[in-house]
Image (tube, grey):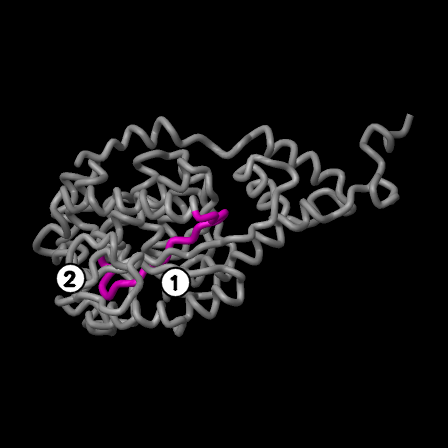
């Protein structure tokens, strides 16, 4: 198996610019002062451009896909929770008891979880949870590669297939979520490498580690970055060295979503790290993304800066799962509704403000 990254550079285009311009013109005709809805206006034109139609259609099938995987680096004491929590949380997602389930229900979205590298076998779960599994846990990136190159390619290809599955089933907006004890350590290492920052600058508290835990985590990120520096120009090798099967799959998922012209709301640190890798593969992919929120993790600000994304919310979240993106989904829907459902001045019989040339004195 050989992944052809050039395909993404060739196939990913920007959202439809002609439609965006039409949406901007429509905004000027709606019954409000120009620009009065602020950022909702630019979000509405983004939705229209991603759909290729103005006015845009309602977002009816938003889908969260949570990529689950264990990480060997968790054994170094980088998390406040034990590794077995990953498998337990997968079952919690399936039964509907997690924060992501509550927020998805509230936002009118649905949730799927996929086991990419959970350390244990999951029993009694639907086939679509486990059918793409690559291995039992990714390696300890501080001292060894997370994956072989073949496993990284397998996981990356699985992410492509998962995006296709969801889009073919009707998903009109995608949200990548994450679950994996220790996963903020590879996320920090990837972001540190791709932003050329040192380990201390990109290492956060994750699940809430104390000072000693932060020191251990920073050392692990430092060691992983040292190991990954020589391969950072090769995105598959980078994911194999300091990422993990869940990271490789999410990166493929983000790129294929752009190929298939589906908008994406990014969540926090983990999806941000994968987005940075995907951006290195095909920079135009970022035009299909919005940042749902700003995480409290320090490395996330580097992601937002590099991708030139302004987060929709800042609620001091650090949970992952797709929760921050789900909180932003109603804002995206509201933006679409204003562009689609508001009347124009002509339709409503409301007088338009005078144009500049009309208001000039002779």
Report the residue marked by disc 2.
73
Q: Position of residue 258 (x, y in %)?
A: 41, 38
What span is in magenta? 169-185
- Packing grade of label 2 (10 A; few <14, some 14-19, many >=20) is many
Location of the C terminus by quadrant is top right
- Packing grade of label 1 (10 A; few <14, some 14-19, many >=20) is some
In this view, the residue in front, 135 or 198, is 135
Tell me the residue at 37%/34% (across/down). Answer: 283
Q: Position of residue 178 (x, y in %)?
A: 32, 59
Q: Name the element at disc 2.
A: helix
Instruction: Reply above or below: 145 against 85.
Output: above
Tell me the residue at 21%/51% (across/down). Answer: 243
Tell me the residue at 15%/60% (across/down). Answer: 136
Q: Is residue 181 magenta?
A: yes
Q: Position of residue 43 (x, y in %)?
A: 58, 46
Location of the N terminus by quadrant is top left
- Evaluate whether residue 214 shows in this view: no
Camera-near label (1 vs 2) is: 2
Does 121 sit left or right of 66 as displayed? left
């Amino acid at each position: 198996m050989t992944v052809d990254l050039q395909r993404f550079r060739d196939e990913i285009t920007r959202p439809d610019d002609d439609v965006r311009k039409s949406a901007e013109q429509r905004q000027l005709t709606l019954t409000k002062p120009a620009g009065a809805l602020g950022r909702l206006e630019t979000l509405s034109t983004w939705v229209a451009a991603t759909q290729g139609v103005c006015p845009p259609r309602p977002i009816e099938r938003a889908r969260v896909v949570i990529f689950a995987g264990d990480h060997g680096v968790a054994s170094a004491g980088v998390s406040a929770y034990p590794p077995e929590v990953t498998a337990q949380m997968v079952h919690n997602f399936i039964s509907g008891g997690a924060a992501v389930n509550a927020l998805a229900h509230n936002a009118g979205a649905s949730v799927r979880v996929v086991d990419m590298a959970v350390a244990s076998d999951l029993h009694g779960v639907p086939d679509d949870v486990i059918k793409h599994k690559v291995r039992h846990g990714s390696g300890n990136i501080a001292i060894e590669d997370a994956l072989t190159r073949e496993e990284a390619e397998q996981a990356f290809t699985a992410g492509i297939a998962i995006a296709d599955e969801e889009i073919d089933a009707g998903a009109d907006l995608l949200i990548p979520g994450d679950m994996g004890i220790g996963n903020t350590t590879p996320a920090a290492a990837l972001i540190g490498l791709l932003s050329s920052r040192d380990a201390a600058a990109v290492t956060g508290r994750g699940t809430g580690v104390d000072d000693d835990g932060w020191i251990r985590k920073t050392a692990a990120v430092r060691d992983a970055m040292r190991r990954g520096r020589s391969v950072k120009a090769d995105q598959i090798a980078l994911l194999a060295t300091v990422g993990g099967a869940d990271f490789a799959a999410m990166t493929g998922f983000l790129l294929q979503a752009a190929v298939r012209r589906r908008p994406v709301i990014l969540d926090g640190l983990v999806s941000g790290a994968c987005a940075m890798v995907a951006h290195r593969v095909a920079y135009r992919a970022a035009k299909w993304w919005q940042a749902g929120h700003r995480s409290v993790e320090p490395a996330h600000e580097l992601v937002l800066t590099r991708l030139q994304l302004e987060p929709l919310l800042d609620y001091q979240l650090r949970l992952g799962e797709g929760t921050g993106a789900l909180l932003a989904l109603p804002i995206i829907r509201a933006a679409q509704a204003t562009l689609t459902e508001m009347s124009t001045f002509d339709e409503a019989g409301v007088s338009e403000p005078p144009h500049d040339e009309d208001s000039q004195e002779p």
